[in-house]
Image (tube, grey):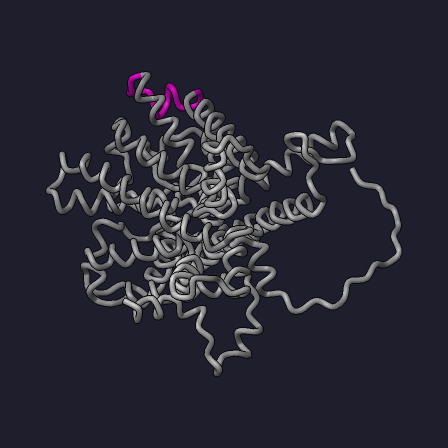
């Protein structure tokens, strides 16, 4: 057992031969490298003849699937349930679990178990993976993350397994239950079912279980850790209040808009109660999870546009989800409101927001917008062969790009038909979306020289 723990904590062991390399790896670089290694490992395992039922798979498709699973996205180029063997699906599930919680979270966990403490470097890496937040007791938070995550996945897996047992043999129901539970908590959106959860669109047990798991995995581990203060009758920190309020508003707004726009369209044949369930489910899953219980080919353009906004915002910092994050959206909204009201200070819940937070939020938002715009240009050029006869080509491309960088996994059906260039672009988007555009920028940046200021000069804007 000790040998296993030492192996899992490999990142925290000091090797003399790579000490110089370790010194050059800041937390952002380490985080980016950890996901790269996980993707490479997943690709190698998926290329094995035992992974695919056909005995072989193109390298790019294996890389795409490994990236999608490791970055908990859910976009697929081949059907998960029919193309991959049981071993291949276990590899995908392994990548989802490690990628969802973060490989550095696991390595730090085993290092903490061995040494009963975290080194300064391990603390920095863990805090970087949690969104850059500083913690007074990261070791305690780390144990809470692992314990809560596994408890939530086990409980969700048992509930779903019992439900699926009515439709499948016990062994298959057990696998389906835990596969969907882990995929939902990690906000991955992978499903062995060819049509995702369309067959269970009106099933209350499946819908509620999946929604609860998605929300728990998407609000951020620090928020879950902070919620214990409610039982102690203490006040939640500002971050937790912003996350909970923004998430609730987005879910409710998404629910009402989806219900309104699709009442007589994709939901037309359902009862009022089933329409409510399906609308809630799509509002929750569209933010970052990627499951679908309705046919997206039947959605109106208005619904597609709003779903893209939800995917763009995504989950919360320090969670399994992607997007620009709920706190970024809240900071940007508060900034705009303050400027409209001509206020000098940006305030949220009667607390001033530091200028550094506003600057970072603006940087994240416009970085993602730039990536979306650039990727759309590339894909519209590279995919024009099979899209030139489709009048809604731009809509499908933009939806695919936003889904990839938001690590959501929803698609309008063009993923399997993409060219090699298109698949590479989506792979890069999923990778950037998982680690975060600013984290990647910090990881790639060279050491900065001492900052200095130059003379200022005014100019007109607006």
Residue 13: where, in percent of width, then height? 44, 73
Residue 392 in view (yes/no): no
Q: Is residue 344 left or right of residue 407?
A: right
| Viewer-proximal residue among 383 and 372 | 372
Q: Residue at x 26, y 47 (%)?
A: 179
Q: Is residue 242 left or right of residue 113?
A: right
425 magenta-colored: no
Residue 86 in view (yes/no): yes
The quarter of the rendered structure image containing the C terminus is: top right
Residue 368: where, in percent of width, then height? 57, 48
| Viewer-proximal residue among 18 and 404 | 18
Residue 81, compared with residue 308, is above or below; it is below
Q: Residue furthest bottom?
A: 17
Q: Is residue 417 left or right of residue 453?
A: left
Which residue range is magenta in the image? 260-271
268 magenta-colored: yes
| Viewer-proximal residue among 121 and 427 | 121
Q: Quadrant of residue 63?
A: bottom left
| Viewer-proximal residue among 406 and 295 | 406
Q: Residue at x 21, y 59 (%)?
A: 87
Residue 101, compared with residue 209, is above or below; it is below
Helix, strand or loop: magenta stretch: loop
Residue 214: where, in percent of width, then height? 38, 39
Q: Residue at x 65, y 33 (%)?
A: 348
Q: Residue at x 34, y 57 (%)?
A: 95
Residue 180, compared with residue 87, is above or below; it is above
The quarter of the rendered structure image containing the N terminus is: bottom left
Q: Quadrant of residue 68?
A: bottom left
Residue 201: where, in percent of width, then height? 28, 30
């Amino acid at each position: 057992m000790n040998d296993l723990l030492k192996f899992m904590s490999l990142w925290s062991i000091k090797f003399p031969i790579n000490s110089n390399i370790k010194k050059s790896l800041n937390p952002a670089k380490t985080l980016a490298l950890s996901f790269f290694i996980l993707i490479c490992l997943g690709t190698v395992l998926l290329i094995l003849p035992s992974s695919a039922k056909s005995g072989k798979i193109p390298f790019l498709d294996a890389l795409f699937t490994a990236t999608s699973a490791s970055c908990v996205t859910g976009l697929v180029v081949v059907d998960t349930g029919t193309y991959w063997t049981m071993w291949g699906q276990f590899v995908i599930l392994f990548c989802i679990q490690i990628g969802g919680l973060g490989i550095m979270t696991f390595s730090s966990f085993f290092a903490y178990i061995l040494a009963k403490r975290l080194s300064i470097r391990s603390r920095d890496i863990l805090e970087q993976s949690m969104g850059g937040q500083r913690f007074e007791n990261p070791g305690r938070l780390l144990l809470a993350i692992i314990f809560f995550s596994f408890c939530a996945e086990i409980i969700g897996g048992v509930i779903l397994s019992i439900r699926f047992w009515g439709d499948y043999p016990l062994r298959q129901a057990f696998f389906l239950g835990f596969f969907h539970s882990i995929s939902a908590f990690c906000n991955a959106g992978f499903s062995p079912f060819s049509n995702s959860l369309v067959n269970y669109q009106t099933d209350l047990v499946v819908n509620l279980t999946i929604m609860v798991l998605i929300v728990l995995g998407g609000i951020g581990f620090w928020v879950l850790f902070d919620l214990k203060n409610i039982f102690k009758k203490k006040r939640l920190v500002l971050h937790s209040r912003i996350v909970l309020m923004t998430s609730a508003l987005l879910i409710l707004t998404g629910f009402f808009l989806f219900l309104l726009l699709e009442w007589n369209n994709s939901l037309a044949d359902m009862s009022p109660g089933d329409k409510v369930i399906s609308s809630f489910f799509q509002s929750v899953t569209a933010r970052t999870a990627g499951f679908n219980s309705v046919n997206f080919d039947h959605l109106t353009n208005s619904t597609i546009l709003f779903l893209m906004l939800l995917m763009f915002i995504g989950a919360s910092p320090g969670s399994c989800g992607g997007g620009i994050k709920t706190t970024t959206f809240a900071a940007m909204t508060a900034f705009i409101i303050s400027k409209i009201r001509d206020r000098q200070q940006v305030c949220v819940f009667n607390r001033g927001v530091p200028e550094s937070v506003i600057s970072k939020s603006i940087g994240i938002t416009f970085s993602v917008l730039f990536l979306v715009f650039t990727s759309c240009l590339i894909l519209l050029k590279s995919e024009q062969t099979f899209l030139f006869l489709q009048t809604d080509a731009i809509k499908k491309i933009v939806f695919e790009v936003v889904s990839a960088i938001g690590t959501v996994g929803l698609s309008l059906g063009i993923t399997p038909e993409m060219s090699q260039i298109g698949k590479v672009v989506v792979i890069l988007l999923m990778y950037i979306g998982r680690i975060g555009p600013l984290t990647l920028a910090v990881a790639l940046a060279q050491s900065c020289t001492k900052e200095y200021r130059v003379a200022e000069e005014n100019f007109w804007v607006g």
